[in-house]
Amino acid sequence: MPKRMKTNPALIGSGILLIISVVLGYGWYSTQEALTKATGELDLQTRAANSFAENLQSAEQDVAQLQEALEQEKERNDSFEDQIKAIGGTVGKLDKLSRTDPELLQKYSKVYFLNENYVPAALTKIPENYTFGSEEEYLSAEIWPFLKDLQDEAKEDDVELLVISGYRSFGKQAALKASYRVTYGSGANTFSADQGYSEHQLGTTIDFTTRAVGSSFVGFDETEAFKWLEDNAYKYGFILSYPSGNSYYQYEPWHWRFVGKELARDLRKDSKDFYDLDQRSLDPYLINFYD
């Protein structure tokens, strides 16, 4: 039977310690290597992050500059657009003004003169149910819608308003004035204009009456029709040309002239009459005459 070898405990312990040391040393080395690697990667990531932050900040600055440039460009474009609109508006107004008869707001009664060749650009016949008497009456075609609205509104308010006289030519006014001179002599000058000085030749002026008053006009200023005109005619652009106390003709409550809604409204608001204003004050209203 063979002999068993004796085990040296000290040698075994040394071996174990050596193995443990090798294992621990390798682990430490691996750990250090991993830590170094991780530190390097973290450093790279940190640098990348810092670089990204710098790039982001630079990009934000670029965006801010672009935004500012865009706003400035937008302001320039808006300013340019406003200038274009202003120019377009001015051109439009000039075109509109060029197509509006400059005579329409002139002060003709004993002040300015219309020659025998003056005729409104377009005349329209006033329908018979809006007139009084058998004669045909005419009016500027562009004024008719305003007059129609006025008469229709009065009718809705149970007020009768009829046209007894509209447009009169130079010749018709001359004949009318001659007939008045035969009857009234020089007294005709207090209520009838000479040819060329009548507002009726403009085609924008109306003499109103009612069936009860007829062609004499007597008592017209005491009728509901006249009171309605005083309260409402301005809404349709009509004003009383010759109120009580005027320096041109006798008081004519039946004689109403179209001057445009804007001027009619302002005259009422300021408690003024058409002939109270100088021509320079009247002319600016011409551009909105038909509005």
Image: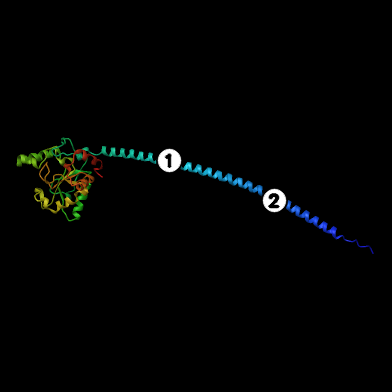
Q: Secondary structure at mark 1?
A: helix
**In front: 115, or 41?**
41
Mark 2 burial class by Cα count in 10 Å: few <14, some 14-19, many 20+: few
The numbered dot on residue 170 is none
Q: Earlier in the sequence, mark 1 or mark 2?
A: 2
Q: Quadrant of the N terminus?
A: bottom right
Residue 232 x/y as whole percent = 19, 51
Residue 20 x/y as whole percent = 78, 56
Tell me: 89 left or right of 214.
right
Q: Is residue 13 above or below residue 76?
A: below
> Dots 1 and 2: beta carbons under 8 Å?
no
**In front: 51, or 220?**
51
Find the residue positioned furthest to the bottom.
1
Amino acid under label 2?
Ala
Residue 233 x/y as whole percent = 19, 49
Q: Is residue 3 above or below residue 249?
A: below
Mark 1 burial class by Cα count in 10 Å: few <14, some 14-19, many 20+: few
**In front: 115, or 267?**
267
User: How far apart are labels 1 and 2 at the CA level?
Assistant: 56 Å
Find the residue positioned furthest to the front.
10
Q: Secondary structure at mark 2?
A: helix
Residue 28 x/y as whole percent = 73, 52
Q: Quadrant of the C terminus?
A: top left
Tell me: 261 left or right of 82.
left
The numbered dot on residue 34 is 2
What residue is at 64 percent from the left and 48 percent from the top?
42
Q: How is the image coloured?
A: rainbow
The numbered dot on residue 72 is 1
Amino acid under label 1?
Gln
Counting every numbered tag in the picture gives 2
